Image (cartoon, rainbow, N blue to C red):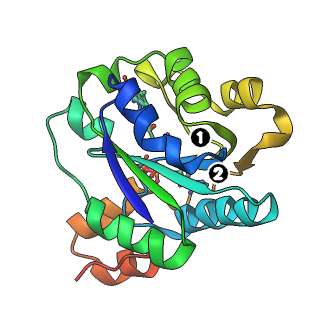
């Protein structure tokens, strides 16, 4: 698996780095902090589509959770290195992209982000949970993904409210490591 770190406003460099893959991608995008059970569900579906349609898989993540960036906080459970190792080992993804979280990313309108996914990354299928948000102020939703990629090319995993990275961070803050690790793919030591 290749790990590429990019900045969202450097499209020419991104295009150059992606060009060697030649074929369109199945993508999933998100923080995937901790790889909890529903992250695993989303990633497994992306893998399944990648195999079924014979397309390479790309996981797009961010150097920092945008919420943390905006609030000058650091609540990460898992490092990029741990995430990349897990995605390579368990899902054999061809590509892992880490987008630098900066003001340019946060202010990228949803239309621009969609255009980058389609034109620069050559993504044709996307897998996300129902509450996935993207673009400035988190205005983009899975409906926007469906409008651009086609209804049949976007898998929407129903939201299971009992599990989120936010809830797991709270468990860890309260010292309940066992309960957190029961939900996490990448265990906390
Ligand atoms: C280009 C881009 C810009 C974003 N801008 C914001 C933002 O301004 N405010 C915000 O709360 N979240 C923003 N988000 C983050 C999303 O709300 C979301 O946290 C992230 O994409 C992961 O998806 P999920 O946590 O909804 O599953 C942005 C995401 C992307 C990809
Ligand atoms: N409980 C869940 N049920 C279904 N899909 C989920 C669930 N949690 C995350 N996902 C999906 O996994 C992908 C990556 O999610 P991401 O890590 O960005 O957010 P998150 O786990 O909801 O984190 P947070 O709780 O910090 O918002 C997204 O498509 C998201 O919708």
Residue reaching furthest right?
Answer: 152
Task: Tell me the CA gap for discs 2 and 1.
Answer: 7 Å
For the C terminus, the image quarter is: bottom left
Which residue carries the number 2 mark? Answer: 159
Q: Give neighbour class at mark 2: few <14, some 14-19, many 20+ (Cα, 10 Å).
A: some
For ligand 2, tell me if the residue under mark 2 lies within 8 Å: yes
Which residue carries the number 1 mark? Answer: 131
Left or right placement of residue 59 versus residue 160 in this view:
left
- Mark 2 and mark 1 residues within 8 Å of each other at the beta carbon: yes
Q: Is residue 105 visible?
A: yes
Give percent across and percent down for residue 174: 23, 68
Give percent across and percent down for residue 88: 46, 71
Q: Residue at x 27, y 35 (%)?
A: 101
For the N terminus, the image quarter is: bottom left
Q: Residue at x 65, y 43 (%)?
A: 130
Image-quadrant location for residue 111: top right
Residue 85, numbered label = none
């Amino acid at each position: 698996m290749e790990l590429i770190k990019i900045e969202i406003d450097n499209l020419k460099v991104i295009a150059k780095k992606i060009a060697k893959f030649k074929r369109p991608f199945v993508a999933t995008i998100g923080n995937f902090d901790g790889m909890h059970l529903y992250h695993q569900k989303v990633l497994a579906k992306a893998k399944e589509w990648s195999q079924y349609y014979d397309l390479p898989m790309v996981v797009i993540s961010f150097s920092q959770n945008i919420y943390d960036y905006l609030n000058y906080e650091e609540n990460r459970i898992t490092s990029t290195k741990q995430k990349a190792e897990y995605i390579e080992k368990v899902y054999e993804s061809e590509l892992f992209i880490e987008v630098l979280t900066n003001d340019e990313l946060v202010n990228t309108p949803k239309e621009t982000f969609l255009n980058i996914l389609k034109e620069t990354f050559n993504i044709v299928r996307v897998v996300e949970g129902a509450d996935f948000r993207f673009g400035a102020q988190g205005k983009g939703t899975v409906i926007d993904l469906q409008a651009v990629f086609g209804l049949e090319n976007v898998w929407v995993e129903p939201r299971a409210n009992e599990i989120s990275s936010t809830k797991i961070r709270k468990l860890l803050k309260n010292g309940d490591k066992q309960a957190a690790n029961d939900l996490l793919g990448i265990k906390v030591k």
